[in-house]
Image (spheres, rainbow, N blue to C red):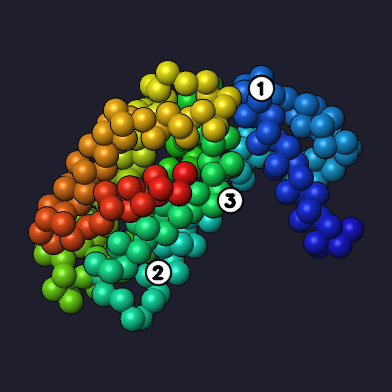
Amino acid sequence: MGTREGDNRKQEFLDTALDLFYEEGYENTTINDIIDKVGLSKGAFYHYFNSKEEVLETIARQYVEKKLNIVEKVVKEENLNALEKLNKIIADMLDFKLQYSEIRWKIFKIITRNNNIKLENEILDNFLELAQPLYEKLMKQGVSEGVFNINYPEEAAELYVHLTKIFKKMTSGVVANFNCNLDDMEALKKKIKEPENIKALKRKYAFYQDTLERIFGTGRGYVKLVDSFLEELKQI
């Protein structure tokens, strides 16, 4: 079996497993369910994975790698100062949400409907570990340029990534409380655009933006989180 064919088969197992975790729940899905839906042998499954848990870990890692590529690419840009990079990462992350809305929706539903803390922690903790060195580099650049007023850039980077994790839970909690059928993505999009729900989400974004500006010492209005959120709403 060629490398590309093998990669395609492995990805087929991952895509099928994600669909089943989404439809049936992680706990209710067995390895045999995944194998039967793919239509390959049990030996083929165990060629790529040792367990259902490893499948879940791989799904989480792939998702994290996509997000990490965004941060890594922006941090390497030489024509932007640190504050411009931070705002570009924020905007590009929101674009990422739109580009990968289907997989994000499935992961969101797996977490909220089945209370799958394991998947949520796999994604958030993996991102924390891998992204922190990139944000440390960004914080140190900002200090040297004078756009961030930070005495402890390493700790600021660590706190920022932890706050991202907390903020994700805060906004997910708002969406999870919508009186909406979680099976209907289009209905959810309409629900998000209702004035009272925009107000609730905007408040969370404004709070987070204010918190970041205080941590980075930029002054008010320099971090463009709320602006990026409102721009994302237009594209939903």
- Element under label 1? helix
| Residue kind at label 3, given as amino acid type | Gln
Report how far apart the C-alphas of labels 1 and 3 lie in the structure: 21 Å
Q: Earlier in the sequence, mark 2 or mark 3?
A: 3
Q: Earlier in the sequence, mark 1 or mark 2?
A: 1
Give left or right: position of 158 versus 27.
Answer: left
Q: Looking at the rendering, which quadrant does residue 208 occupy?
A: top left
Q: Looking at the rendering, which quadrant does residue 142 occupy?
A: bottom left
Front position in the image: 214 or 116: 214
Residue 93 vertical position relative to residue 189 in the rendered view, above or below: below
Judged by depth in the image, the label closer to the viewer, 1 or 3, is: 1
- Category of crowding for the residue at label 3, using alpha-carbon neighbours closer than 10 angstroms: few (below 14), some (14–19), many (at least 20): few
Residue at 48% x, 25% y: name it: 112
> Which residue is identified by label 2?
74
> Which residue is identified by label 3?
62
Residue 96 vertical position relative to residue 125 in the rendered view, above or below: below
Q: Where is residue 167? Give x, y as percent.
A: 31, 40
> Which residue is identified by label 1?
24
